[in-house]
Amino acid sequence: MIHRWVTLLALLAVLSGCVTETVKTTSVPTLATYETELADDEILDIAIAVFDPGISEVDADDNIYPEIRRAEATFIARELALVLDDQGVWGASRVVPSADYISDIIVSGSIEQSDGESLVLNIEARDARGQLWLDKAYSGSTSRYAYQQTQRVKRDPFLGVYRRIANDLILAFQALSREERLAVRNVARLKFAQSFAPDAFADYLKTDESNITRAVRLPAESDPMMARITT
C-alpha cells in the first residue's frame, strides 16, 4: 500500500510539471535540428495524437489508476509537442484528439509502462501519404529525486525519451527529397479539401495496394474552391 501511494504521488508530480533539473535518468541527448534553412514550401506541420493510455486490459492488481493514465496520455503528447516546437523545424506542432486528424505528419503512440520511475512508449509516425516514418519503442527511467521541488530549474524527468523521438523524426525528415516533401504537403492539402468537398476533389488522390496515397493531379493555383477551403 505504501508503494502504491508513493507511485501515485510521483505520477501526480509528473502531471503538475513539478520536476527538477537534477534528474537521475537515462542520458538526455542534444535536441537535433535541421542544419540548413528550409524553403517555406518544404516545412511540414506535425500533429501528435493523444496517446492510448494502455488501460484496455488492465487488471485491478496492476497498480494502475485509469484516471491518472488518461491524464498522462494527454500530458505526454503535450510534452512531446513542446519538444518538437523547440526543434524549430516543423511548421506547427499541435496535440490533436486522434490519429484521424489530417496533417503533414501524424504521430501516435501508446503507453506501455508508466509508474513514475520508468516510462515505455510505443510510437508510430506516418506522413500524409501513409508512408511510415517511425515504428519503435522508447524507454527511460528516473528516480524519486527527479520529483523534488527544491531546485530552481525544472524539466520533465523523461525529457530524454521525448528528445529521442524528436531526433528520430528529424532523421526521417532529412531522408526525404524536396520532391517527397512537396508530395507530402500536396496530399495533406488535398485530403483536407476532400474532407470539405469530397465530390469536387474525389479524383485528385489515389491510394495504391500498399496503402500509400499520391496526388494524381493538383488543382489550379486560381481554383476558387481550393482558395475558400485553405484560407
Image (spheres, rainbow, N blue to C red):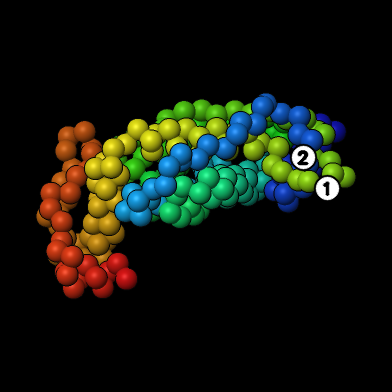
Left or right position of 147 against 37 = right
Q: Is residue 28 above or below residue 92?
A: above
| Residue behind mark 1 | 152
Q: Residue at x 34, y 43 (%)?
A: 127
For marks 2 and 1, the one nearer the N-term is: 2
> Closer to the camera, 65 or 18?
18
Type of amino acid under label 1 = Arg
Looking at the image, can residue 150 be seen?
A: yes
Q: Residue at x 83, y 47 (%)?
A: 152
Q: Residue at x 28, y 42 (%)?
A: 178
**Where residue 21 is drawn, which disc sits there?**
2
Query: Which residue is situated farthest in the right direction here?
Result: 150
Considering the numbered disc 2 on the image, is that residue within a helix, a strand or a loop? loop
Which quarter of the rendering shows the N terminus?
Answer: top right
Q: Position of residue 164 (x, y in %)?
A: 55, 32
Neighbour tally class for label 1: few under 14, some 14-19, many 20 plus, Cα within 10 Å: few
Q: Residue at x 35, y 51 (%)?
A: 39
Q: Position of residue 98 (x, y in %)?
A: 44, 51
Q: Position of residue 220 (x, y in %)?
A: 14, 64
> Closer to the camera, 88 or 144?
88
Left or right position of 179 against 14 = left
Q: Answer whether labels 2 and 1 touch (C-beta < 8 Å).
A: yes
